[in-house]
Image (cartoon, rainbow, N blue to C red):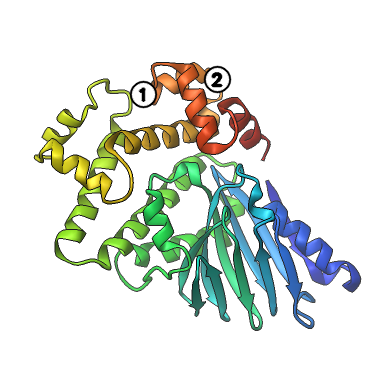
Amino acid sequence: MQLSLDLSDVPAEDRLAVWRSAAEASFVPVEIVAGDDGLSSATLHSHDVGDVRVCDVRAGAGRVVRNRRLTGDSSEDYVIVAVQRSGSGRVVQDGRDAVLSPGDVVCYRTTRPYELLYGGPFWQSLVRIPRALLASPDAVLADATANPIPAGSGVGRLLVPLLSGLAEDAANFAGRPGEHELANAVVELFGAAVVERRAGRKNGPQNAREVLRARIRNFLENRLGDPDLSPRNVAAEHNISVRHLHKLFSEVGTTFGGALRDVRLRAAGRELHRPGAAHWTIEAVARRCGFADVSYFSRLFTRAYGVSPRQWRARTSDE
């Protein structure tokens, strides 16, 4: 998808409808209330780079709302990452209210209601990431939504210039060799930033357990097709007891088996979304990601994402 819009070329009475349509095409359906003259010179440039959608948005005062009615479509599961380039803004989700100044970066989920507020002219760079591409556990993402990611140090210091530069120059990357690798780098760097943010808020043993969980998930991600991914073998690889392994995941409301299924399902979602794997059968994708029974895989996938693997592949290929 490529979309470039300048509302200064649109009649005043049509601007709000055109802007809402562009927002829906670039992100997800939302309700928009524009402030006085907030859309007179608004611009939006949106490009698909690999599996992510990158947008550069400039507009005036207004309010964007995604309510419970609009979040009903389970297939619209994205994480939107926003970098405030100029002006100010607010992101309200899950009872949090993040106030953004230039240089701040924040994320929000499209499966839950949110509100975006802008008091005057602003400029944002945004990246829409399919949830299926992120290895980050739900607990980590839930902690990150509407919570600014520190941009002055750690991974955030790398993330902000990458997202900003990509949004400004997305047209030069879309459809070019290496675009999928670039998109994967964005996804991985954002995932590292939210894990680092969560771990940085904890002290001592809690921090160490968070880091160890992330290390184990990464290990599972790299060994998806290994038939020996048993609790005993994984625990031995990380020099911990099986009991400690199970406790690590029970602390975040899951089990080792649940975490492994989650990693495998997300990997399958990525593969089904990847053009280079378009010639693979659903069964081949399932086996590559560690599922021996394709029917069992299809049931799990449908329950997790609300659509079958075949529908997921068809939907993403049409975007």
Is 164 situated left or right of 68 in this image? Answer: left
Residue in view at x 39 percent, y 37 percent: 262
Q: Type of residue at label 2?
A: His
* Quadrant in the picture for the C terminus: top right
> Which of these two is toward me, 269 or 65?
65
Find disc 2 in the rendering and name its residue: 279
Could you classify mark 1 by the number of other residues whose Cα lies within 10 Å: few (under 14), some (14-19), or many (20 or more)?
many
Spatial separation of the CA atoms under disc 2 and disc 1: 19 Å
Q: Quadrant of residue 207?
A: bottom left
Report how many numbered discs are placed on residues in the image: 2
Can residue 8 be spotted in the picture? Answer: yes
Secondary element under disc 2, as helix, strand or loop, is loop
The tag earlier along the polypeptide, 2 or 1, is: 2
Is 73 situated left or right of 49 in this image? Answer: right
Find disc 1 in the rendering and name its residue: 290
> Which of these two is toward me, 140 or 275?
140
Residue in view at x 49 percent, y 75 percent: 98
Can residue 274 be spotted in the picture? Answer: no
